Image (cartoon, rainbow, N blue to C red):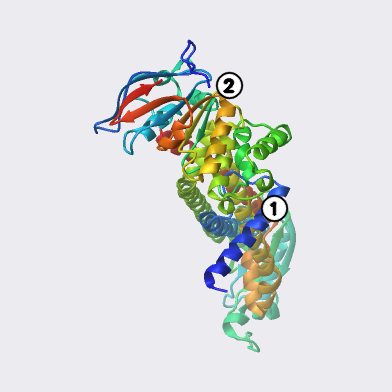
Amino acid sequence: MTAGREAGNLIRFENVGLRYGVGPEVLRDLSFDIGPKSFQFLTGPSGAGKTSLIRLFFLALKPTRGLISVFGREVSGLAKSELPALRRRIGVVFQDFRLLDHLTTFENVALPFRVLGREEAAYRADVIDLLRWVGLGDRMHAFPPILSGGEKQRAAIARALITRPEVLLADEPTGNVDPPLARRLMRLFVELNKLGTSVIIATHDINLMNQFDARRLVLEEGRLTIYD
Amino acid sequence: MTEADLAHKLQLASFRRQTRQATSRPNQLVPENTVAGNALTVVIVIMSFLACLTLGAVTLVRDASRDWQLDIQREVTIQVRPVDGVDVETESAKAAAMARQTPGVAGVEVLDAKENAKLLEPWLGSNLDLSDLPIPRLVVVRLTDPNAANLGDLAARLKAQVKGASLDDHRGWAARLQSMANATVLAGLAILSLVFVATVLSVVFATRGAMASNSVVVSVLHICGAEDGFIAREFQRHFLLLGLRGGLIGAAAAGLLFALLGFLVIPSISGTDSDQVSALFGHFAVGPIGYFGALGIAFLIAVMTALTSRLTVYQHLADGD
């Protein structure tokens, strides 16, 4: 696993603060970098601001103070029309999967390609290969409501990975699966990291983090402590 | 088997069916056949049906009005009232001869006593001896070209030379009929506009509802890097198909009703009623403009639905920022 603190950071936070409306700051003075090919866990107790930080990562929110730069672009100066191109470089796996129930597993995983306007013939083989890699080769025509929790999790991960994003953000990716499958999914993230993707995994699972020698970003009451 | 087991089996069967369908064509990103979507289809069917009926009625009245106008302009009537000491038959013949000599007149017909009796039959009944009654004689004058005939001169000559004669060119009646027809057409167009406005508003609310109920779809598309234009196009395609389906069903229903009215209802009205209906509405046949117009309305409603949904989606996405 590569530490990746060198120059050319993919994401950089400088004294970032976030508040909703006139409420108190939920994130305070965050300053850190996400380097290329890096692997890190994001952890902290419930209510510490993890979800808000994740939303800042994938550009669903803008900070109320401080600077965030993503792939060299300063976020607060970005026009709305510039966001989609940056979002395509970040893969996100949500805790609640966010699969579309009316689309098959294949179609859910292929969604980023449809958004790019590609023809199915151009991506079909890639999607099938990835579905096989995550163990869903025989479930590609099934709809999410009949998939198990683990299968949904893998489909959500496959959708986040299909376009080979430069950064993968996974929110509790092992929260709904049994320990053997959790280890398998973690191996998948490690493999992906070795192939060059920076990985950020948000988790509460101390045992899981202890199995990997990786950087930890610990959020407590809106403040971040980094353990390299 | 418990009710829950049965529901589970039905759900599985539904998913298997969807799975088979999924292998044949890609699913739309905006879910089809939702309760809200079906309700909007029904609303559009009704709106399209009402719009097509209105258009049919407008074309019917407009065609009938044009026919009245033509008929009335090509025919004038000379009325010869009985005057004491004057033979009405002689005066009628004199009036007919004067009319024949007038330029632009195609033919002149003096209605005899029997034809007069037939005209009065609806009011006075049949088998009535009219010889004792002072019934005016009518001379029907058909014109080749209403503009070429100098009807003012004919009226003046009739008044001077034929006792009891007067010329009725029906213009007052024609003007009133024309005003009534124009008012009906305007009212029809106003109704048509209201139907369109109601359709647009229904689509605005339905699109907002669809955006709210498909917020997960919108958020997933955003996360996958979709631009607003892509999301708007997906919703627009969904609503275009929905609008086209609803519009065509409504137009087809209206077309069927026009055909049924034309073929079944009006011929069943007999005798004098039928004559009166024919006089007013011709053969109650909605012409090609009515049918093609209904088809046009279906497509117009589909395009309106698609454009409205597109604008609503853009506004919704802009509001969400």
Check disc 1 and give the amino acid type.
Gln
**Image position, residue B307 (x, y; %):** 55, 40
Disc 2 versus disc 1: nearer the observer: 2
Residue B116 appears in view: no
Helix, strand or loop under label 2: loop
Judging from the image, mark 2 belongs to the subunit labelled A
Q: How many marks?
A: 2
When the figure is inspected, residue B174 is found, relative to residue B80, above or below; the finding is above
Check disc 2 and give the amino acid type.
Gly
When the figure is inspected, residue B151 is found, relative to residue A169, above or below; the finding is below
Which residue is label 2 attached to? Answer: A196
Q: Are marks 2 and 1 on the same chain?
A: no
Image quadrant in which the N terminus of chain B is located: bottom right
- Viewed as shown, does residue B47 lie left or right of B121? left
**Image position, residue B11 (x, y; %):** 59, 61
Q: At 69% across and 52% down in the image, what residue appears?
A: B21
Which residue is label 1 attached to? Answer: B21
Q: At 58% across and 72% down in the image, what residue appears?
A: B81
Helix, strand or loop under label 1: helix
**Image position, residue B49 (x, y; %):** 58, 59
Q: Determine which quarter of the picture holds residue B141.
A: bottom right
> In this orientation, which residue lies closer to the viewer: B100 or B236?
B236
Image quadrant in which the C terminus of chain B is located: top left
Q: At 60% across and 81% down in the image, what residue appears?
A: B122
Marks 2 and 1, how far apart in space?
38 Å
- Viewed as shown, does residue A137 lie left or right of B34? right
> In this orientation, which residue lies closer to the viewer: A62 or B182?
A62
> In this orientation, which residue lies closer to the viewer: B52 or B233?
B233
